[in-house]
Image (tube, rainbow, N blue to C red):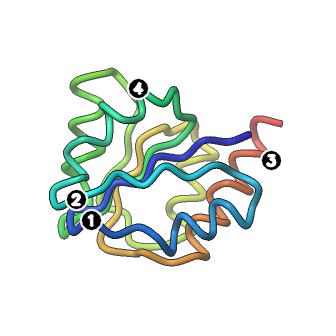
Amino acid sequence: MTKVVIADRMGKGQHVAAGVEKAGGVAVVVPGMGADMRLGDVMNQEKADIGISFCGSGGAGAITAKNKYGYTERHSMRSVQEGVTAIEDGIQALGFGFMDTEELGQKLVEAYKRING
């Protein structure tokens, strides 16, 4: 199963989690304000396949995950297609502006499964 950590600056992420689960993945939502900054820690702890960080700039959590744990990252994304392309490019930590949508979670897991079997 594809395990996805979701870390939102405002403590949200439930809609993306629903999309992850709809696509057959396992969602781990990091609780609390400032959760995006703990993305890498929880990815490492959970041995996650993908991490998604949400904040206004769309980058802090993904960049921190790269700097602390060496995950590949792409940040400042603003669309589902950008996320799918990042997955196709082998990116592990994805940084988005606030986009807590079911479609995003579903499409990312579908792309990951398609690429990684």
- Find the distance from the CA under tag 1 to the CA under tag 4: 19 Å
Picture residue at 19% right of the left edge, 70% below the top: 56
Decide: marks 1, 4 in contact (CB < 8 A)?
no
Picture residue at 46% right of the left edge, 70% below the top: 14
Crowding near the residue tagged with mark 3, few <14, some 14–19, many ≥20 C-alpha atoms within 10 Å? few
Quadrant where the C terminus is found in the figure:
top right
- Find the distance from the CA under tag 4 to the CA under tag 3: 25 Å
- Find the distance from the CA under tag 3 to the CA under tag 2: 32 Å
Which badge, 3 or 2, comes first in the chain's sequence? 2
* Drawn side of residue 21 relative to residue 64, left or right: right
> In the picture, residue 93 is in which quadrant?
top left
Q: Nearer the viewer, residue 54 or 10?
A: 10
Q: In the rendered structure, find residue 114 and report the number of the disc placed on it.
A: 3
- Find the distance from the CA under tag 4 to the CA under tag 2: 17 Å
Decide: marks 3, 2 in contact (CB < 8 A)?
no
In what element is the residue under mark 1? loop
Decide: marks 1, 2 in contact (CB < 8 A)?
yes
* Tag count: 4
Picture residue at 31% right of the left edge, 21% below the top: 69
Residue assigned mark 4: 45
Crowding near the residue tagged with mark 4, few <14, some 14–19, many ≥20 C-alpha atoms within 10 Å? few
Residue assigned mark 1: 11
Q: In the rendered structure, find residue 19 and report the number of the disc placed on it.
A: none
Residue assigned mark 2: 32
In what element is the residue under mark 4? helix
Asked if 70 appears above or below 105 in the picture, the reply is above
- Find the distance from the CA under tag 1 to the CA under tag 2: 5 Å
Q: Position of residue 76 (x, y in %)?
A: 29, 60
Q: Position of residue 106 (x, y in %)?
A: 66, 66
Task: Kindly identify the amino acid type of the residue bearing the numbered disc 2.
Answer: Gly
Crowding near the residue tagged with mark 1, few <14, some 14–19, many ≥20 C-alpha atoms within 10 Å? some
